[in-house]
């Protein structure tokens, strides 16, 4: 029987970040993932990207993997432009206002996973099993027994469920979940634009939902996230490539010049999920297994990385006499639940404020954005929240 201190189910960016942090603290780790192992980037951009905050960058730097990530396709963004299509409201800011080299980076999720995978391969105290599923999980007061489909048993002091929004582990241990449908579907795609992106992340709030244009490593390419009503998403996905390009150019008000979308548009529903319970004895939830939020502020990946950062710190603390004690795990649960609640409420408030064309809402949006843009102290706080500082 194999014995490790921590077993992580889920080999996404959040799970692998946790594994790397624990490995560097000389904690033995087993990673299990039913998907194939991360591979080098394809020639074309992937649809799934993340806006990595400065706080997440600091974590990657601490784990000595940031340089590996930025040697792949990465786009720093130095400017943000947020505007409401139906009002005079607009807010724009740049990294110079905070005396920073950039506000963050747009990175393909595949690049983050591949860099983490390569770094983890250098550690003898980490075992990674991809294309591997488990058949059962049983826990006692002190241990968790994970039996793989091959029949191999793994005994761990802690099991971390980083197995995504539809977490099977969360369901098995009956951890209650609060959720609601945002009544939005997100269309994601890579877009070639006539004009340079000038390292600017753009977001325009349309009556049906927000559209984000995120700069990629090539100055003529953006990754888009178009959140809109399910009916509108279905209509947009049914359009020909040329018709979709025209609709996209109108929606962004020509800010990037003519748009040419790649063939592989994808769409997925958006739902808020929040686990009321993150801890069941020696099983804890992390990342999307614990929380999912609307992508309008690009916080999803960063929230999961904050989960990983705290658990790394708590499990690595040599002052704890017992590894992964209930006290330590409860501190993780309390701290991260509070932060997730705050961001869920903030995203819901923003979605409701910027949705629809009611004249009063339009006035509030216009006045609110203009005030933030013109009042230095308030704008400074807004920008610090946006970059994760």
Image (cartoon, rainbow, N blue to C red):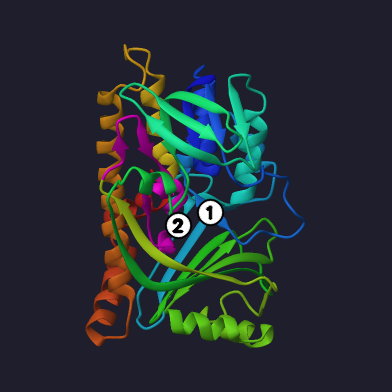
Q: Is residue 289 one of those drawn in magenta?
A: yes
Report the magenta residues as a range: 277-303
Check the picture and name the quadrant holding the C terminus: top left
Give the residue displayed 32% in from the left and 57% down from the top: 379
Check the picture and name the quadrant holding the N terminus: top right
| Residue 66, image x, y percentages | 59, 36
The secondary element bearing badge 2 is classed as: loop
Gap between marks 1 and 2 measured at Cα:
7 Å
In the picture provided, is 272 more to the left or to the right than 103? left
| Residue 214, image x, y percentages | 56, 62
Q: Is residue 274 one of those drawn in magenta?
A: no
Evaluate if marks 1 and 2 touch, with contact meaning CB atoms under 8 Å apart: yes
Q: Residue furthest left?
A: 360
144 in relation to 107, above or below: above
Residue highlighted by disc 1? 50
Give 182 or 358, whichever is nearer the viewer: 182
Please tell me the numbered disc located at residue 298. Answer: 2
The secondary element bearing badge 1 is classed as: strand
**One can see residue 370 in this view:** no
In the picture provided, is 87 more to the left or to the right than 196? left
In the picture provided, is 302 more to the left or to the right than 245? left
């Amino acid at each position: 029987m194999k014995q490790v201190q921590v077993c992580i189910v889920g080999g996404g960016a959040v799970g692998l970040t946790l594994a790397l942090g624990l490995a560097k603290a000389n904690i033995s780790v087993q990673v299990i993932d039913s998907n194939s192992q991360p591979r080098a980037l394809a020639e074309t951009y992937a649809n799934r990207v993340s806006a990595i905050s400065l706080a997440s960058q600091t974590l990657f730097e601490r784990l000595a993997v940031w340089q590996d990530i930025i040697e792949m396709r990465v786009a720093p963004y130095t400017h943000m432009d947020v505007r409401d299509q139906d009002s005079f409201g607009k807010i724009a800011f740049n990294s110079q206002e905070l005396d920073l080299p950039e506000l963050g980076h747009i990175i393909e999720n595949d690049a983050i996973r591949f860099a983490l995978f390569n770094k983890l391969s250098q550690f003898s105290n980490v075992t990674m099993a991809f294309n591997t599923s488990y058949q059962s999980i049983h826990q006692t007061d002190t241990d968790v027994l994970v039996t793989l489909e091959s029949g191999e048993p793994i005994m761990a002091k802690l099991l971390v469920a980083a197995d995504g929004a539809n977490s099977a582990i969360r369901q098995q241990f009956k951890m209650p979940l609060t959720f609601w449908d945002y009544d939005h579907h997100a269309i994601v795609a890579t877009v070639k634009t006539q004009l340079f992106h000038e390292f600017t992340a753009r977001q325009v709030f349309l009556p049906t939902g927000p559209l984000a244009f995120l700069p990629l490593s090539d100055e003529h390419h953006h990754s888009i996230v178009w959140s809109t009503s399910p009916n509108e998403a279905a209509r947009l996905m049914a359009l020909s490539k040329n018709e979709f390009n025209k609709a996209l150019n109108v929606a962004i008000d020509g800010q990037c010049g003519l748009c040419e979308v790649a063939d592989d548009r994808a769409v997925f529903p958006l739902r808020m999920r929040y686990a009321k319970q993150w801890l069941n004895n020696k099983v804890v939830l992390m990342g999307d297994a614990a929380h999912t939020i609307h992508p309008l502020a690009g916080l999803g990946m960063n929230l999961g990385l904050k989960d990983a950062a705290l658990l790394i710190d708590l499990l690595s603390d040599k002052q704890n006499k017992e590894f992964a004690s209930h006290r330590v795990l409860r501190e993780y649960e309390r701290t991260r639940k509070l932060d997730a609640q705050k961001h869920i409420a903030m995203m819901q408030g923003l979605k409701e404020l910027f949705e629809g064309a009611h004249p009063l809402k339009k006035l509030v949006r216009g006045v609110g954005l203009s005030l933030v843009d013109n009042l230095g102290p308030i704008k400074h706080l807004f920008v610090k929240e946006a970059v994760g500082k």
